[in-house]
Structure formats: C-alpha cells, structure tokens
Amino acid sequence: MSILVMAGQLMLSLSILIVLHEMGHFLPARWFKTRVEKFYLFFDPWFSLLRFKKGDTEYGLGWLPLGGYVKIAGMIDESFDTEQMKQPPQPWEFRSKPAWQRLIMMLGGVTVNFILGFLILGMVLFTWGEMFIPNAKITNGIAVDSLGKDLGLRNGDHLLKVGDAPFTEFNDRLVVRGIVIDKARTLTVRRDGNEVVIPVSAEWVDILSRYENKSNWLFTARIPFIVFKTDPKGPAAKAGIKAGDTILSVNGMEISFYDQYQQEFQPKPNQVLQLRVARGRDTLEKQVTTNAEGKILLLTPSLLNMYTPEKKSFSLGEALPAGFSNGFGFLGDQFKAFGMMFSGQIKASESLGGFGSIASMYGDVWNWERFWRMTAILSLILAFMNLLPIPALDGGHVLFLLYEMVSGRKPSDKFMEIATMTGFILILALVLFANGLDILRLFK
C-alpha cells in the first residue's frame, strides 16, 4: 500500500506539472496563430488511452508516463515529422513565425514551471508556515550516529557553527548541506565548556553525497533515558518497566542519557541487567533479561516528543517573497551540485535517481504539505533540466533560436533533425541510467 501511495503522489504531481508546462507552449502558440496539432499528457507510442479532437488540436492521454508534449505544426521536435517539413512553409506553422515569437513559445514551458514552483512554495508557507526547533532549545547537546562520530562530533556536543554560518535551527540536514554545497570546512562546537573547532576534510563531500548515506543521520538531540513506550510482550514490560519511568543506572553504572546506555552496554542475548528506576518519587530496582537479539524492547521519546517545534507564520505578502527566496536558494544549490558533479567532486552514480528515488521522497503517508512542497521542488527541477542546452529539450531549441537571432542564419532542417535525434537518445540514455541505478540499489 505504501508503494501505491508514493506512486500515486508522484503521478499526480507529474500530471499537474506536465499539463501546465505544455500549456506554457500551447498558449503562446495560439496567441501567435500557430497551429498546435497535438496536446498530450504522457507519451503515446503506437496507441493512446484517450483522445479527442477540438478544432485543429487532438487532445489525449498516453500510456507511457515519461512526460508529455505538444506537437506544433512546422517544428522539428521529438515527433520527427519530417514529411511535413518537406512541404512549403505555411503561415500557421512554427517555422514561418519570427524568431522572437518562436523563442517565446519555447520558453513558455519552463517559465510556467519556474513561476509555479515559486508560487507553490509561497502558498505552502502561507498555509502551513515553517516549523523548526531552535538549536538553543537543545540544552543537553547532541547524540551522534556512527557517521557523525567519524566526522568528529561527540555525544554531548553543542553545535554552534557550520563553517562561518551560525547553527540556529536544529537539523542535521543543514550540516550536510553546509559541507556538501557550501563547502564548509569546519564545525564549531561547545564541548565540556570549551569551544572546539573540528576540521572537515574535502573527502566528506563525497562521503555525505553517497546514496547509501542519504538516509543516515549524523546526530539527533541527546535524549534523557526516559521510557516513552514498551513492547507489551518485551523484556522491559515483563520486568515491570512502565512508560514515564526514568532509568537511573544499569548494572551499577549511572546513566543520564539513552546514548550512554547504547555506548556503554552492548547487551548479549539472555543477559541479565540490573536497572535502578525512578517512578514519581519512588526509586525501584528492576531486573531485566535481554531477548535473543540482546534487546529489552523499550522506546525513548523522539526529538518531537521532547521539544515542541516553533512555527513561523507568514502573511500572503510575506509568503510569496519567501517562497521565491527559498526556490531561488534551491536552484542555486542545484547549480552548485551540477558544477561539483561535472568537476568530479560528486559522483553522478551516487547523486542521480529515477522515478523510484523521486517517489520515495513523497513518503508512504499522504501528507498535503509535503506533497505540495515536493511538487514545487519537482517543478523547479523540471524547469532547470529543460533549460539545459541539449537538443530535444527546450533549452536546445532556445540555444539554436538565439544563434539564429544573433547570426541571422537559421540552422538547416537536416541539422535540426540530427541534433534533435542525438539529444533524444542522450535523454533516453540518462533516464535509463537513472532508473537503472534505482534497480541496482534494490539488490544492494
């Protein structure tokens, strides 16, 4: 069921974005009295699921959900309708229009995606606001995972700065972004009352951008060893441990935080642990025997159980500029990431993902805030990717039109046909490569 939820969210997002992107081409074409022969959501090789004709345009639903298209008369595109191009130009055809009009038609799709992405991000802020946990609230410091420990962080550290940027919102993803995108080479922490600067070597850009580490956390808040929940059939519950109890010591060693228990004790199967427990005003002694996996099956509070996030609300006048700022920042990160990929600092095989990777980012529970935020991000990514100067993409057509406007010479139809076919093969190879990576990751 979770797979269906993720796939359903991705399909709905793509449908919205593709239709509006193609409308960005369709409407300028109509304004400039250019005939649009087809308008399709998804591709329709060999057959379509639904189609009808209105005026000069056939509208339809294809069966291959890799995109969509409008077929503009007199234009060499992914339809490769070369027979039409052999006929004399007609006044309603794309090739008969001035270069500036053709440029507007080509830029229409990405323009819609850019505007849509910024607008949705703004409306998300207006509707749901922005939730965050101030770093100042994390008074007990951090509890590090193995990745954070390798980076040089320690349990109990209070993170102060990532590079030169103050660490004000408690979120380990901001540290990852700071190191990978902003190339932060130091982390500043308060440790045992002293300010300590931790050097971060350049190799961490590669380590943190690896696909295998994308879901691995560096740290979370240090949580007191308070019992939030026990498994009714687990060792802790059978020994009489209850929700709300505080574990004070294990086998005579005083314990204040759950990470201390994890660090100091590596319980073995069927091992007896002597626990001193605080319950209200009482102090109790409990004996717990670990299960066959060496666990006692209790949960401590999560970050959100311990700390109530603060909400920053936005008026409509504040939300729209903030949405633009967030979207522009995201695009800036994409430019940096692409540059690092081309320079070899980030491996394409670790950073790219297909439809499976994208769908997983929506989550296995339908959440409208996350859905619209992901739709906005996907809209900006589609705009960015479509602007790349690759033939068969909008950016390729724009590049050739700019060349024509500057030089006064129009590329030949044969050149455009070969360039478009080359670009189409390149894009298809990239799609297969990205989705192939997803398949390979399933078997790792």
Image (cartoon, rainbow, N blue to C red):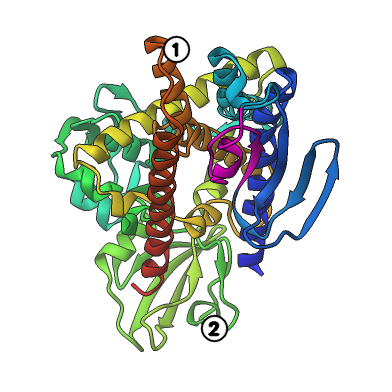
Q: Looking at the picture, how far across and down is residue 278, in whole percent?
A: 49, 62
Q: Is residue 3 left or right of residue 299?
A: right
Which region shows up in magenta? 68-88
- Which class describes the residues within 10 Å of circle 2: few (<14), some (14-19), or many (20+)? some
Q: Looking at the picture, how far across and down is residue 5, in whole percent?
A: 66, 61
Residue at position x 69%, y 49% in the image: 12
Q: Tag on residue 238?
A: 2
| Residue 410 figure quarter | top left
Q: Tag on residue 356?
A: none
Give 62 or 431, whichever is nearer the viewer.
62
Q: Secondary structure at mark 2?
A: helix
Q: State yes or no: residue 179 in magenta.
A: no
Q: Which residue is mark 1?
A: 405
Could you tell me if residue 155 is visible in this image? no
The C terminus, quarter of image: bottom left
Could you tell me if residue 406 is visible in this image? yes
Residue at position x 56%, y 28% in the image: 110
